[in-house]
Image: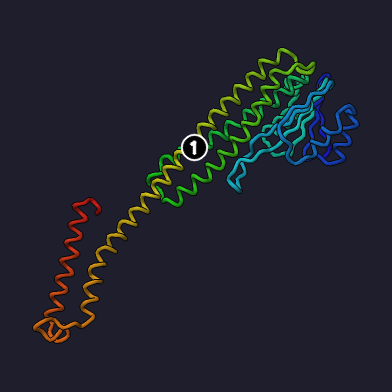
Amino acid sequence: MALQTLTYGRVTWVNIVHPSPADVDELRELYPYIHPLNLEDVQSHMERPKIDEDEDYLFVVMHFPFWDVTNALSRAREVDIFVGRGYVVTIHDGILRPLLNLWEKCEKEGVYREKLLGRGANHTFYTIIDQLVDYIFPILRKVDGNIRRIEEDVFTADTPAAIREISLVRRDVLALRRIIRQQVPIIEQLERVEHPIIHDDLEEYFGDIADHLYKARDIIDENFEIISILADTADTLASHRINEVMRILTVISVIMLPLTLLTSFYGMNIPLPGNEGFLVHDEPFWILSLLMIGLVLSLLVYFRRRGWL
């Protein structure tokens, strides 16, 4: 996609979606002092979050979460930003909605363009990052809702379904936790950086963004603890239900053991003293049947008194 530009006063915002080699070459022509390694980084599929300081500009790489509906997972989307004297360059894949909305609103509304670009490139840079950080909280609220639903259903829902739901949410929480934690050092560094591009009056603004990220980090850490406890609870419930099944099967096995022993003797046709054998008369069959029933009832009463049933 070709370079898009918006200008107000002495500030220009250059926006590149899905940068191609031709886009990178055009960016090199516009700002020839940008280091070739930074231009190489913008073509990388997933660069680690970082800040590169140059005499004429700052190069910032950050990641922000995007909800993947197909896989039910928050994935990291990269945003590369160059900020220099009188310009801001954003390079991304066109998925993060806050960045797209900010561009469209600035493109269509002259008043908003003046508000965004009229206070200098460094303020535009701050506003872009602030909007992207604020976008994290609706995703966190969605995660909170999923966790609350699991909390309400964990004792009543079908165990395999509950374990699957917990596993999906836990995977999403881990992904968000990894994304958010990696951005905190970047904002902290921007808060402390001493560079002519970043004015001192923006220190408080980046401090506010840092506070938002701290809050997001605390929320996702708490979510991680809760979902881990819910996972342990689900495992305990599953183990308890398995133990219940094993207990019933054990009781059945113990009951069947003496019956099997008695019927094995009966099947051997061994004559009793003073009698012609089990096959001649019916009385042994009924005696044996009553004995088996008595054994079963005795075992059931015994198991009941021991609290096994």
The residue that appears at 60% across and 48% down in the rendered structure is: 71
Residue 133 is situated, as x and y percent measured from the top left of the image, at 64, 28
Residue 72 lies in what quarter of the image? top right
The residue that appears at 83% across and 37% down in the rendered structure is: 40
Query: Furthest residue to the front?
Result: 273
In this rendering, position of residue 156 left or right of residue 262? right
Q: Residues within 10 Å of mark 1 (few under 14, many from 20)?
A: few
In this rendering, position of residue 268 left or right of residue 140? left
Q: Measured along the vertical axis of the image, is residue 124 above or below residue 271?
A: above
In the rendered image, the quadrant that contains the C terminus is bottom left
In this rendering, position of residue 77 left or right of residue 241? right
In this rendering, position of residue 60 left or right of residue 131? right
The residue that appears at 44% across and 40% down in the rendered structure is: 230
Closer to us: 172 or 111: 172
Closer to us: 138 or 280: 280
| Residue 173 visible in the picture | yes
Q: How many marks?
A: 1
Query: Furthest residue to the left?
Result: 274
Q: Measured along the vertical axis of the image, is residue 63 above or below residue 7?
A: below
Closer to us: 204 or 12: 204
The residue that appears at 71% across and 26% down in the rendered structure is: 128
In the rendered image, the quadrant that contains the N terminus is top right
Residue at mark 1: 145
Residue 109 is situated, as x and y percent measured from the top left of the image, at 73, 26
Circle 1: residue type: Gly
Q: Measured along the vertical axis of the image, is residue 184 above or below residue 165?
A: above
Residue 53 is situated, as x and y percent measured from the top left of the image, at 79, 23
Name the secondary structure under disc 1. helix
Residue 132 lies in what quarter of the image? top right
Residue 64 lies in what quarter of the image? top right
Residue 116 is situated, as x and y percent measured from the top left of the image, at 73, 22
| Residue 108 visible in the picture | no
